[in-house]
C-alpha cells in the first residue's frame, strides 16, 4: 500500500453530503446518516455529479494562471497541484489559435496574475514512454502519494482515492502519442480518475468500424477489471469515460447505422446488441494546446450566464423543445440569461447577435439543417455565421448532423468548437427530434447534479445513439464561485506576462507585446496600443501585430480600427477561415453606414465565401450600389452568378441583380 501524506477524508465526505442535499428541499437532513440516505436516493447520474462536485468544492483554486511553452513544463506545473489547491495551466504553442484560446480562458477566469514559466530542462524532447511515465508521476505527486519500491502509480492512486472516501468516478483513456494528452493529465488529476493507455484507429472526422469499436471497448473493460475497479453498471465506481484522443467521432454499426462513438463507449456487449449503459462518455480532441485549454475550462470555469437562440415554432412537437422555459430554469439556477425574442428568429437577427462576442459560459440553440448549415426563420445560415465566443462555453445544439465532422471548421460543431466551445453536444447523423433531450429538461438536469455527459442523453431510445458528447463528460453547471485557495507561492522563475509585455513594447517588439497583452487579459491596454499606433506610427504595424490586435478590437467595438488592421494582413492570412469570418462579423455593421459602406465593401470583396456566395455578394453589392458604385455592384453579382452551384444560389443572385438594376 502507498503511504498517504495527506488525509482530506472528512473534507471530501462533507462536501459529498452537501452536494447530495443541494437539490431543493424544505427540511434538509440534519445528521450524517440521513445525509447518506439522501445520497443513496439520487439517480445514478446525480450520484455521479454529487461525487464530482464534492471534489471540485473541496479543493481550493488559486487566482493565478500559469502559461508554459513546452510539454515538460506543462507536466511539472500540474504535478505541483495539491490536495488543497490548484491553478490553471495553459500551453502556448505560438499559433494564433492557441493564443486566442488562452485569451478567452483568461478573460473568463479573471486571475490576479498571469505568469509565464518554464521548468528546468523544459525545452528538451522526450519519447512517448517517457511522457507517459512523467504524467503518471505527476498525478502521484499531486495527490500526495509516496510509492513503495516497485509499486505502480495507477493502483496506488486508486487506493489513495478509496482511502479518502472518494473512489474514482470515471476513467480517462488516451494513447501514448496522442496530441490530446494534456487534457488527459489535467482531467485525470483534477477528477480523481485513473488513466488507461490505449488508442483507437482513425481521425476525428472519420468513422470507426464496428469491429474496431468492439475491440476498443472490450480492451477498456478488461483494463478496468484488471485494475480492480467496479465499472459494469451505473451507480458503481466508474460511471464516466473521457476519451482524450483524436479518434473518430462517428461509429459504423451494422444494426444502428451511423452512431456516435461516445455512445458506443460505456455500453456492455457488442455494437450489434442493445447493450445497457455502464458509463457516460465524452470526447476531448485537438492539438495539445487546445486540448489543455478545454480541459482547464471544464475544471476551473463557472458559468455565470447563458445565451439562448430558438428558431422553432410554438407548435407541437417543436414547442416541447422551447428555450423560453429553459431560460427560466437557468435563471432559477442563478445564471444571467440572454435569449432571442420569439419574433426575432431570422438570419438578420442571428447576424446582429454575432456582431459582438457572446459572453456566456453556456449556449443552447434550436435549429434544423445539416452538417454545415442551419435554418433560421427566415433564412439559412452556414457554419461560418456562428458567433465568436468571448469566453469558453458549453454548447448544446438541437440540430441534425451538426457533429458529423467536428474537426471541420466550417461545419456547425466545428465552428462552435473553433470559436471557443470547450464542450459540445450534437448529432453525428439524423437522430429524429424526439431523440434530443428537450431544452427545458436539459436545463433542469444541469441544475440537478447531472454532469454534461449524462444530461444530454435519453437512454433507451435507439436514435439517441447518434448524439455525440464532445468535451469532459463530468463538467458540471455550477454558478457558485470556486473555493479560494490559501496563498500559494509562484513557481520559481515565473515571470508576469504584463511585465514581459511592457518590456517587449519598450524594446519596439510590438507584435510580441501585443500577444502577451492579449494572453494576459489586458485587452483594453492592447486596444489602446493598437489605436495609438494606427494614429501616430502606422509604419510600425506589421502583419503579426495586426493579427494579434484583431479580437481585442472586435471585443471593444472598434470596428474602424479592426478594418485598418485587417487591411494590413497579407491576402493569404486575410483568407484564413477564422480571420475571414471574424472580419465579416466585425465589419458587417459598417456596410450599413453611408460613410464607410463603399470602403468596407471593397475590403471584403476578395472574401466572398463559397458557403455564403449569394448572401455575401448581395450584401457587398447593396453597400456599393447605395454609395453610388452600381457598376462595381453589378460586377460582384455577375462574378458570383458564374460561381453559383445550384438553382437556389442562381435565383438569389439574379434577384439581387434585378434589385439594383441590370
Image (cartoon, grey):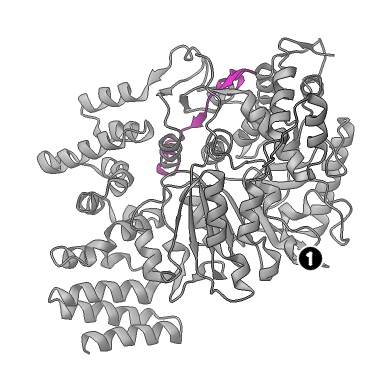
- The reply, left or right, for residue 190 in relation to residue 33 is left
Q: Is residue 521 magenta?
A: no
Position of the C terminus, as image quadrant, is bottom left
Q: What residue lies at 79% left-to-right and 65% top-to-bottom?
A: 462
- The reply, left or right, for residue 409 in relation to residue 592 is right
- The reply, left or right, for residue 224 in relation to residue 580 is right
Location of residue 152 by image quarter = top right
Location of residue 588 by image quarter = bottom left
Q: What residue lies at 87% left-to-right and 35% top-to-bottom?
A: 230
Taking depth in this image into account, of 2 and 547 the one nearest to the observer is: 2
| Residue where numbered disc 1 is placed | 462
Is residue 557 positioned above or below 168 on the image?
below
Q: What residue lies at 14% left-to-right and 73% top-to-bottom?
A: 627
Q: Does the magenta stretch include residue 78?
A: yes
Span of residues in magenta:
76-99
Callout 1: 10 Å neighbours few (<14), some, many (20+)?
A: few
Q: Is mark 1 on a helix, strand or loop?
A: helix
Residue 408: % across, % down: 53, 58
Q: Is residue 434 visible?
A: yes
Position of the N terminus, as image quadrant, is top right
Amino acid at each position: 500500500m502507498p503511504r498517504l501524506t495527506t488525509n482530506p477524508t472528512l473534507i471530501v465526505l462533507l462536501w459529498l453530503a452537501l452536494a447530495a442535499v443541494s437539490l431543493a428541499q424544505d427540511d434538509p437532513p440534519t445528521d450524517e446518516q440521513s445525509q447518506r440516505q439522501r445520497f443513496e436516493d439520487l439517480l445514478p447520474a446525480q450520484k455521479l455529479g454529487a461525487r464530482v462536485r464534492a471534489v471540485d468544492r473541496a479543493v481550493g483554486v488559486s487566482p493565478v494562471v500559469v502559461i508554459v511553452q513546452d510539454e515538460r513544463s506543462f507536466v511539472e506545473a500540474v504535478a505541483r497541484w495539491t490536495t488543497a489547491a490548484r491553478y490553471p495551466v495553459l500551453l502556448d504553442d505560438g499559433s494564433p489559435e492557441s493564443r486566442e484560446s488562452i485569451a478567452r480562458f483568461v478573460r473568463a477566469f479573471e486571475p490576479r496574475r498571469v505568469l509565464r514559466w518554464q521548468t528546468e530542462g523544459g525545452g528538451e524532447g522526450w519519447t512517448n514512454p517517457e511522457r507517459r511515465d512523467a504524467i503518471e508521476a505527476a498525478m502521484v505527486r499531486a495527490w500526495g502519494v509516496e510509492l513503495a519500491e516497485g509499486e505502480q502509480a495507477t493502483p496506488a492512486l486508486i487506493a489513495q482515492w478509496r482511502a479518502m472516501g472518494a473512489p474514482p468516478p470515471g476513467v480517462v483513456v488516451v494513447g501514448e502519442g496522442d496530441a490530446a494528452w494534456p487534457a488527459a493529465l489535467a482531467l485525470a488529476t483534477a477528477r480523481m480518475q485513473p488513466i488507461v493507455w490505449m488508442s483507437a484507429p482513425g481521425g476525428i472526422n472519420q468513422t470507426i468500424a464496428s469491429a474496431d469499436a468492439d475491440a476498443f471497448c472490450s480492451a477498456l473493460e478488461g483494463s478496468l477489471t484488471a485494475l480492480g475497479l467496479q465499472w459494469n453498471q451505473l451507480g458503481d465506481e466508474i460511471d464516466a469515460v473521457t476519451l482524450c484522443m483524436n479518434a473518430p467521432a462517428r461509429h459504423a454499426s451494422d444494426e444502428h447505422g451511423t452512431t456516435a462513438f461516445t455512445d458506443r463507449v460505456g455500453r456492455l456487449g457488442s455494437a450489434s446488441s442493445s447493450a445497457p449503459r455502464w458509463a457516460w462518455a465524452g470526447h476531448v480532441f485537438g492539438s495539445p494546446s487546445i486540448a489543455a485549454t478545454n480541459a482547464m475550462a471544464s475544471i476551473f470555469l463557472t458559468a455565470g450566464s447563458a445565451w439562448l437562440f430558438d428558431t422553432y415554432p410554438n407548435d407541437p412537437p417543436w414547442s416541447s423543445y422551447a428555450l423560453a422555459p429553459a431560460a427560466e430554469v437557468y435563471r432559477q439556477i442563478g445564471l444571467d440569461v440572454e435569449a432571442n425574442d420569439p419574433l426575432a428568429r431570422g438570419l438578420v437577427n442571428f447576424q446582429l447577435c454575432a456582431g459582438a462576442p457572446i459572453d456566456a459560459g453556456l449556449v443552447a440553440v434550436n435549429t434544423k439543417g445539416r452538417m454545415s448549415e442551419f435554418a433560421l426563420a427566415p433564412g439559412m445560415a452556414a457554419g461560418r455565421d456562428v458567433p465568436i465566443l468571448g469566453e469558453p462555453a458549453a454548447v448544446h445544439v438541437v440540430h441534425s448532423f451538426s457533429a458529423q465532422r467536428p474537426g471541420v471548421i466550417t461545419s456547425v460543431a466545428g465552428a462552435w468548437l473553433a470559436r471557443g466551445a470547450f464542450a459540445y453536444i450534437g448529432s453525428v447523423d439524423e437522430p429524429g427530434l424526439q431523440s434530443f433531450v428537450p431544452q427545458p429538461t436539459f436545463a433542469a438536469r444541469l441544475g440537478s447534479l447531472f454532469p454534461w455527459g449524462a444530461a444530454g442523453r435519453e437512454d433507451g431510445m435507439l436514435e439517441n445513439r447518434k448524439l455525440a458528447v464532445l468535451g469532459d463528460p463530468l463538467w458540471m453547471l455550477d454558478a457558485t464561485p470556486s473555493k479560494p485557495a490559501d496563498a500559494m507561492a509562484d513557481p520559481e522563475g515565473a515571470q508576469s506576462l504584463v511585465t514581459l509585455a511592457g518590456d517587449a513594447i519598450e524594446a519596439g517588439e510590438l507584435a510580441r507585446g501585443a500577444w502577451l497583452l492579449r494572453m494576459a487579459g489586458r485587452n483594453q491596454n492592447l486596444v489602446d496600443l493598437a489605436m495609438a499606433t494606427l494614429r501616430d506610427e502606422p509604419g510600425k504595424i506589421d502583419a503579426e501585430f495586426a493579427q494579434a490586435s484583431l479580437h481585442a478590437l472586435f471585443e471593444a467595438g472598434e470596428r474602424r480600427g479592426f478594418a485598418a488592421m485587417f487591411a494590413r494582413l497579407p491576402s493569404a492570412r486575410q483568407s484564413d477561415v477564422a480571420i475571414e469570418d471574424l472580419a465579416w462579423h466585425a465589419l458587417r455593421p459598417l456596410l450599413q453606414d453611408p460613410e464607410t459602406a463603399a470602403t468596407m465593401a471593397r475590403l471584403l470583396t476578395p472574401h466572398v465565401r463559397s458557403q455564403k456566395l449569394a448572401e455575401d455578394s448581395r450584401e457587398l453589392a447593396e453597400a456599393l450600389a447605395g454609395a453610388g458604385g452600381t457598376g462595381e455592384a453589378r460586377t460582384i453579382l455577375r462574378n458570383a452568378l458564374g460561381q453559383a452551384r445550384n438553382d437556389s444560389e442562381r435565383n438569389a443572385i439574379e434577384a439581387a441583380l434585378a434589385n439594383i438594376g441590370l
